[in-house]
């Protein structure tokens, strides 16, 4: 056990990755506390955050982050941030002629961003039943900001106002964090970063110099740097940029961990069949290249599949999210990422990035699949054995569009259960009473969870971690949770509704309905989450199907414009072969069956 802080640098490449990353950083910010009298939490925040100082001497705490996006993607957010405000600096004018000043109205801020501006200046927010006042100091602690935002949480309904990820960013960023790629536009039909080859060609000249400068800045101030956490869009040209960035990281920092998560939204605005084909090609090429240059590569998406005809989006029993809203789907993925990244962020018993990757990426199997239950289904007042015994199957759903094989075969698995604070990890069985299940007779939460998972994967290597603290939800996290959940994200029994109580007196029906409304007026402020990272034979048919989907058509005839964006046909063919060989690495030949590796040609 060591308390050494092993720093991690995060890269977010692309607009949807920044959506997921913004929610993720908001979750981390919600767990921060500067109160010295409070006991330290589960996580060592210095792993992801850096301490600095403004020109005025104020202490800052900002993410160790490099974020890349396109021109027009920031809206109200200044590229250099607002911590080191140099806008008031003046320079001498040598021009004696007349001046004409053209001013463009800045984009309007939503209610959440307006309240953040007030808090930055020390204004106490006005809420019902509270008087408005002001503070002389413009420095509020994170605890104060969180508590004030929580008091007005009900007023934030940003579904109609969130256009870009900065519309719900609640933290300050370092001036060296944001890189804007000016060659391509975020909006509009012209100059779009749509193809893999476009992204590959970007990492040169000014873009390369800017990234290299930012990397050196963040790396050189680390004492025990352990590696990079990369979030990269898979469906557009950022897949090509991410491939070159991970290759650059591998060449320069090969001894460090590079954990890459490829993100993809459920849907894109203004999609066409040709654009969907581009998305498929970018996904396949990006996965092959980024996996080869990373310690592991994990797709993260709520799509029903990566192909041209995906099934319905992934649904969860206690979530009511809108699949068409990036603001919603990215919030679900951020909760999963909050648990998936637990091992290397812990204060005690942390696991270095390289060890996590090595346990999953044996024999060159660098693509792993993620699964999660959001929230973890647990009844208020029950125990962990009760919750797991109530599950007829494993509680999680695919977060990488890769279904589990169901045959109990797995090369490696890492399970994290987060949020059991205040819940019983074991069962209290009275002396002489028979336990309801074998799980109820175990004496630690780790034994309970390990026994449950090994019942589905009896021979698979397993690593697991239990973290007591849940994922804390603070404004502006969307309220996408079922009313059947308590404020802590646990299940609770509802009173009979008027339809279920239709044979009773109408007054009693109205009473139950009003009481239910009163019970659930409080919003969910934290949730327990369970996730699993897996490497196993289930990835073989998944990768093989992706390979077949692309090999079924002649790209030179169907999508010649994709090749015209800088990708050579020889490189494309080599990537397809690498994808086929990658799938074979996950093939389970223990049963003696052999799958045909030939691909059918189809128009």
Image: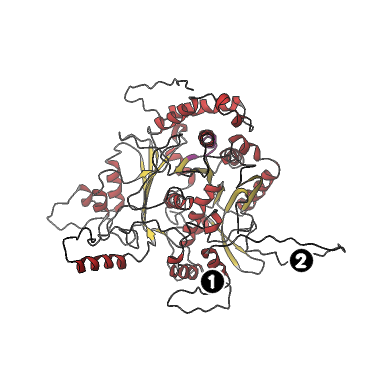
Instruction: Report the front residue among 383 and 278.
Output: 278
Mark 2 — residue?
90
- From the viewer's perspective, is the residue at label 2 or at label 1 nearer? 2
x then y, percent, for residue 2: 46, 54
x then y, percent, for residue 164: 55, 53
Mark 1 — residue?
140
Q: At 51% across and 74% down in the image, what residue appears? A: 124
x then y, percent, for residue 337: 45, 49
Q: How much space separates mark 2 and mark 1, taking CA atoms? A: 29 Å
Pointer 1: residues within 10 angstroms few (<14), some, or many (20+)?
some
What secondary structure is found at the residue carrying circle 1?
Answer: loop
Q: Is residue 347 magenta?
A: no
Residue 4 is left or right of residue 505, and the answer is right
What secondary structure is found at the residue carrying circle 2?
Answer: loop
Q: Which residues are magenta?
A: 289-297
Q: At 54% across and 54% down in the image, what residue appears? A: 163
Residue at the left extreme, as displayed = 432
């Amino acid at each position: 056990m060591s308390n050494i802080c092993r720093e991690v640098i995060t890269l977010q490449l692309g607009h949807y990755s920044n959506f997921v990353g913004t929610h993720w950083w908001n979750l981390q910010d919600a767990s921060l506390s500067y109160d010295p009298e409070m006991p330290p939490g589960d996580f060592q925040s210095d792993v992801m955050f850096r301490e600095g100082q403004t020109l005025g001497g104020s202490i800052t705490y900002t993410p160790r982050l490099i974020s890349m996006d396109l021109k027009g993607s920031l809206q109200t957010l200044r590229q250099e941030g607002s911590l080191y405000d140099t806008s008031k600096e003046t320079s001498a004018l040598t021009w004696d002629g007349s001046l004409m000043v053209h001013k463009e109205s800045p984009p309007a801020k939503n209610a959440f961003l307006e309240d953040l501006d007030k808090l930055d200046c020390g204004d106490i927010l006005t809420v019902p039943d509270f008087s408005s006042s002001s503070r002389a100091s413009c420095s509020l602690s994170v605890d104060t900001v969180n508590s004030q935002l929580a008091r007005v949480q009900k007023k934030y309904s940003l579904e109609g106002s969130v256009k870009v990820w900065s519309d719900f960013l609640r933290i300050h960023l370092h001036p060296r964090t944001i890189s804007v790629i000016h060659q391509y536009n975020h909006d509009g039909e012209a100059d779009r970063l749509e193809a893999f080859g476009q992204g590959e060609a970007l990492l040169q000249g000014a873009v390369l110099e800017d990234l290299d400068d930012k990397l050196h800045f963040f790396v050189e101030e680390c004492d025990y740097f352990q590696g990079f956490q990369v979030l990269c869009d898979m469906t557009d040209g950022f897949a090509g940029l991410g491939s070159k960035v991970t290759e650059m990281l591998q060449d320069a920092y090969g001894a460090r961990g590079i954990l890459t998560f490829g993100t993809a939204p459920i849907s894109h605005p203004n999609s066409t069949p040709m654009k969907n084909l581009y998305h498929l090609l970018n996904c396949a090429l990006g996965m092959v290249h980024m996996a080869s240059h990373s310690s592991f590569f994990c797709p993260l998406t709520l799509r029903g599949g990566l192909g041209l005809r995906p099934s319905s989006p992934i649904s969860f029993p206690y979530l009511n999210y809108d699949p068409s809203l990036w603001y919603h789907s990215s919030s679900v993925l951020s909760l999963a990422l909050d648990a998936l990244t637990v091992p290397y962020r812990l204060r005690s018993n942390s696991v270095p990035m390289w060890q996590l990757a090595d346990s999953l990426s044996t024999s060159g199997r660098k693509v792993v699949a993620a699964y999660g239950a959001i929230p973890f289904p647990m009844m208020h007042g029950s125990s962990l054995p009760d919750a797991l015994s109530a599950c007829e199957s494993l509680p999680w759903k695919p977060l990488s569009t890769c279904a589990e094989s169901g045959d109990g075969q797995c090369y490696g698995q890492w399970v994290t259960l987060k949020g059991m604070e205040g819940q019983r990890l074991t069962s209290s069985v009275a002396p002489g009473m028979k336990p309801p299940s074998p799980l109820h007779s175990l004496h630690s939460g780790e034994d309970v969870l390990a026994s449950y998972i090994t019942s589905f994967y009896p021979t698979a290597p397993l690593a697991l971690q239990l973290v007591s603290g849940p994922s804390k939800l603070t404004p502006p996290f969307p309220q996408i949770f079922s009313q059947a959940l308590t404020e802590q994200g646990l299940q609770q029994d509802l009173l009979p509704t008027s339809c279920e109580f239709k044979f009773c007196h109408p007054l009693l029906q109205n009473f139950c309905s009003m009481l239910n409304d009163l019970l659930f007026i409080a919003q969910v402020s934290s949730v327990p989450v369970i996730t699993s990272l897996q490497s196993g034979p289930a990835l073989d048919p998944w990768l093989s199907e992706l390979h077949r989907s692309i090999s079924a058509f002649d790209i030179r005839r169907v999508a010649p414009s994709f090749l015209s964006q800088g990708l050579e046909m020889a490189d494309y063919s080599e990537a397809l072969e690498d994808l086929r060989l990658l799938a074979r690495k996950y093939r389970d030949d223990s049963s003696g069956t052999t799958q045909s590796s030939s691909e059918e040609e189809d128009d």
